[in-house]
């Protein structure tokens, strides 16, 4: 048995992708030129199919002339999947090993880079609350995508996610019950606004924007996998510039910085949980 080509089989040349990324950069200032090419190409094909657009040239025209469509395009080509306490062993590690270090500081700054719809932010807020440190934290949460930032600030999620959220939380050696932090209304979970009221949600593009503050802890999880090595190196420089000496950086389970250009400026604190510490300016 072999697959017959259908009207939806779409081939895209590298040249087309370059024209698309150039057009987006020129018109909107977003630079997708250094995203990992194979996954970026798959997402573009998905966008073409979803909107019934037959060629990249037509997609470019639509993007250039319809800024609302462009917002949807950003949402479509970025992967926004996230969870409360994603990788519970990581959050347990934070609770046991990193939060005690933060506890030695009178106040501290945290950046959730590429925070998506904010479940990671709420997870950290719950940990800090349970360890009695929430009032000492100054927190920024950023993403390239305005739509997910809005959802993050609302701290509101579909009820169907609740079981997974509870299971993850239970694996972090919790000091409370997840029910203490949310109410359910109209098929949605509403987290306590106090978990995000101290957080500044801002637009920030890791591919083009610069550092804007200094942090004691930066989460940059599950976004670098979508970037090529050049862009990952750029982001590591940016994150390094954004950390105080002795500050921590956390990456996603499939990411690492041991290979990067400035790896000698970091110490590997835990390569399984992907936690690194800035040891050189
Ligand atoms: C898979 S989510 C990761 C969410 C969360 N950090 C986690 O680990 O669960 C990836 C996020 O990266 C964001 N993103 C993609 N490219 C970005 C860029 N250039 N700058 C900032 N955020 C970006 C996407 O919008 C998406 O919300």
Image (cartoon, helix red, strand yellow):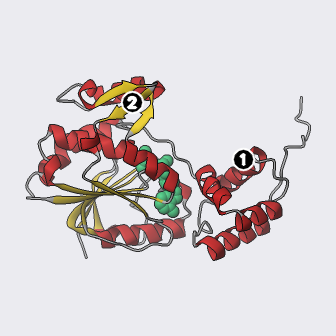
Q: Is residue 57 above or below residue 128?
A: below
Q: Dot 1 surroundings within 10 Å: few (below 14), some, or many (20 or more)? A: some
Foreground mark, 2 or 1, reads 2
**Residue 143 x, y percent position in the rendering:** 45, 57
Q: What secondary structure is marked by label 1?
A: helix
Where is mark 2, residue-wise? 189
Residue 168 picture location, percent across and down: 35, 30
Ranked by sequence position, the earlier of labels 2 and 1 is: 1
Q: What residue did someone put label 1 on? A: 46
Depth check: give the residue in front, 160 or 280.
160
Closer to the camera in the image, 215 or 181: 181
Query: In whole angstroms, how far apart are the C-alphas of marks 2 and 1?
Result: 30 Å
Please tell me which residue lies in front, 275 or 20: 20
Residue drawn at (60%, 59%) of the image: 36
> Image point 17% across, 29% down: which residue?
175
Query: Considering the numbered disc 2 on the image, is that residue within a helix, a strand or a loop?
Result: strand
Which quarter of the picture shows residue 92?
Answer: top left
- Residue 33 screen position, x and y as percent: 62, 69
Q: Is mark 2 within 8 Å of ligand 1?
A: no
Residue visible at 24% across and 39% down in the picture: 126
Residue 243 visible to the viewer:
yes
């Amino acid at each position: 048995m072999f697959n017959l080509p259908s009207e939806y089989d779409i081939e895209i040349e590298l040249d087309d992708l370059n024209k698309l990324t150039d057009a987006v950069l020129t018109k909107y200032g977003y630079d997708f030129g250094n995203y990992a090419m194979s996954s970026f190409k798959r997402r573009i094909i998905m966008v073409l199919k979803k909107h019934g657009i037959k060629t990249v040239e037509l997609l470019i025209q639509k993007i250039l002339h319809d800024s609302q469509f462009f917002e949807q395009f950003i949402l479509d080509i970025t992967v926004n999947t996230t969870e409360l306490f994603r990788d519970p062993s990581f959050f347990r590690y934070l609770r046991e090993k990193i939060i005690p270090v933060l506890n030695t500081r009178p106040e501290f700054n945290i950046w959730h880079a590429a925070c998506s719809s904010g479940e990671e932010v709420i997870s950290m807020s719950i940990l800090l609350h349970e360890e009695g440190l929430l009032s000492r934290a100054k927190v920024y949460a950023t993403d390239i995508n305005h739509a997910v930032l809005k959802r993050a600030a609302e701290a509101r999620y579909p009820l169907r996610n609740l079981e997974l959220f509870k299971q993850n939380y239970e694996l972090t050696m919790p000091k409370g019950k997840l029910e203490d932090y949310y109410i359910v209304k109209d098929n949605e979970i509403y987290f306590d606004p106090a978990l995000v009221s101290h957080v500044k949600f801002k637009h920030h593009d890791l591919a083009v924007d610069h550092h804007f503050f200094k942090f004691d802890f930066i989460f940059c999880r599950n976004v670098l996998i979508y970037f090529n090595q050049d862009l990952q190196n750029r982001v590591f420089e940016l994150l390094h510039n954004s950390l105080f000496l002795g500050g921590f950086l956390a990456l996603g389970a499939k990411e690492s910085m041991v290979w990067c250009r400035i790896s000698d400026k970091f110490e590997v604190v835990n390569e399984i949980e992907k936690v690194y510490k800035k040891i050189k300016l």
